[in-house]
Amino acid sequence: MIFTLAFRHLLVRKRRSLFLLFGFSLGVGVMIVLLSVGEAMLAQSRDVSLVGGGELTILPQGIDIEAMRTGGLGGMFFGIDRARFLTREVLGGDRFKSRVRVVSPFIEGKLVYLRHGKRTMAVRAGGEIPSRAAAVGSRLDVRAGTWDDSPSDASYMSPTRQQFYDELDHFHLPPHPDPTWGEWHYFNLVISPEEWWYITFLVGGEVRSGNWGGQILITRRSRGSRYDRFTSQVPAPEVAFNTARADLTLSRSAVRQRNGSYQIHAEAQGSAGRVNLDFQLLPETNRYFPPVELREASFVSGYVVPALSGRASGKICISGQCQDFSGVQAYHDHNWGVWRDVGWEWGSGSGGRLNLLYGGVYDSSSMASENSRSSAPFFFALVDSFGVKQVLRFSRVHYEGKQRAAGVLGVTAPKNFTVIAARDDDTVRLTVQVEDALSSEMAARQFRRIFLQMRGRFTLAGRVTGQEVADTGMGFFETYIDK
């Protein structure tokens, strides 16, 4: 009976029947596609090359997703630089805590070699933080035993202050003996608007394998634009540094870091007498820049800033005349590398809301002409109370005007300069009015040049991450000029 009615309906209502059949066929086709997509998603979720969890996966820029899944050449050798910094500060820090509930870092499919006796096997290895993997729904199904956070897992995600500054500010060994290797702690203190100090603890030479040693370099700028220099040479037997933390001993001078507090003692001799500095430096929270290392054919340059801004308290004595200071502005960075015929552009400033940091290293061939130097990949970073806000790029520093510089007779410094940095839609403009400058003569194999240390007032304006930024403040700046 039903078949008879259906057949007669087809004969009487031909167009309606064809329309209904078309709709039914379309629905069946869509269902087949959805089932196929679902089956493919299920298969991919079980693919060992596709791991993770949560709602968002962060991958290295430029990676081919399919090549990564299938193991093609496009997926080889990719990694995320400064992953700890990204995990803790950029993604998991205070800036996005209202939008990011948890961050789970992992390593997957890395080639390692397992050796047992005389047999060596190539295997794939991975790693993740158990508690974080569980939080994003990708915890491994452990059939026996336990899989919980180890002490190293805990220090990776939430290090103590001691662990954090040990990671940032430890010493290094050169890859091979090199007489141009140098590594140093640098501090500056602003005691008053008319007095500031540059303090360097330096280790250099063919470290632990030849001719090497240490040096204390201290410069004081006092009223009337007077500069006093103090130095101390330290032989290798009296030098002790630590590749696991910031601690450094140069004879009776020393740097110690404990729980994020730096204790500094320095002694040196100069034309103004003997200087003794004893002070404590406390970095401000989140006001730091993570370690970066640049490797070129002619040099290696590493750099980290544990304290873009901090507060220092202590005592300075010159020839028995002492002065106490408390809560003054302080800065600390750490440099290492092979410094063979190189120069740099560098600047750091503290404003009402932002810290700025810019820099870049170039070799002697880049110094030969202004055009070649302008192609150097300089960086420009803005840091606020949440940490690094943005890192931009710029090609050159635009210096203008001339004024007298202290130090080398006849040397002039710029009156002002400008930096314009950009990244995608972000652009900032930095303008600096130079108020004081110190020149020092530097000698190298192929050239002689002048090193300028400047103090100036800056104005910053632009747009970063969709927001207008503007700030003013004071800073220290460095550059090289031809003699």
Image (spheres, helix red, strand yellow):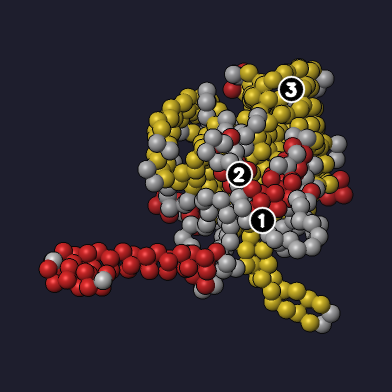
- Name the amino acid type tagged 3: Ser
In front: 389, or 205? 389
Query: Label 2 sits on what residue type?
Result: Val
Residue 274 percent across, percent down from the top left: 80, 27
Q: Which residue position is annotated with label 3? A: 313
In the rendered structure, which disc, 3 or 1, sits on the residue that comes first in sequence?
1
Label 1 sits on a secondary structure element that is loop
Closer to the camera, 203 or 42? Answer: 42
Q: Position of residue 90 (x, y in %)?
A: 56, 42
Query: Within 10 angstroms of label 1, few (less than 14), some, or many (20 or more) residues?
Result: some
For disc 3, the neighbor class at 10 Å (few under 14, some 14 to 19, many from 20) is: some
| Towards the viewer: 263 or 129 | 129
Q: Is residue 468 left or right of residue 232?
A: left
Q: Which residue is mark 1?
A: 139
Q: Do the CB atoms of the residues marked 1 and 2 lie less than 8 Å apart?
A: no
Earlier sequence position, callout 1 versus callout 2: 2
Q: Which residue is mark 2?
A: 102
Between the C-alphas of marks 1 and 2, the distance is 14 Å
Position of 434 with respect to 303 (left or right) is left
**Mark 2 surroundings: few (<14), some (14-19) or many (≥20) residues within 10 A:** some
Mark 3–mark 1 distance (CA, rounded to whole Å)? 48 Å
- What SS does tag 2 mark? loop
Mark nearest the camera among 3 and 1 is 1
Residues at marks 2 and 3 touching, judged by CB atoms closer than 8 Å: no
> Can the viewer see residue 185 in this picture?
yes
- Left or right side of 382 for 177: right
Residue name at image x 58 percent, y 57 percent: 52
Depth-wise, is mark 2 or mark 3 nearer the camera?
2
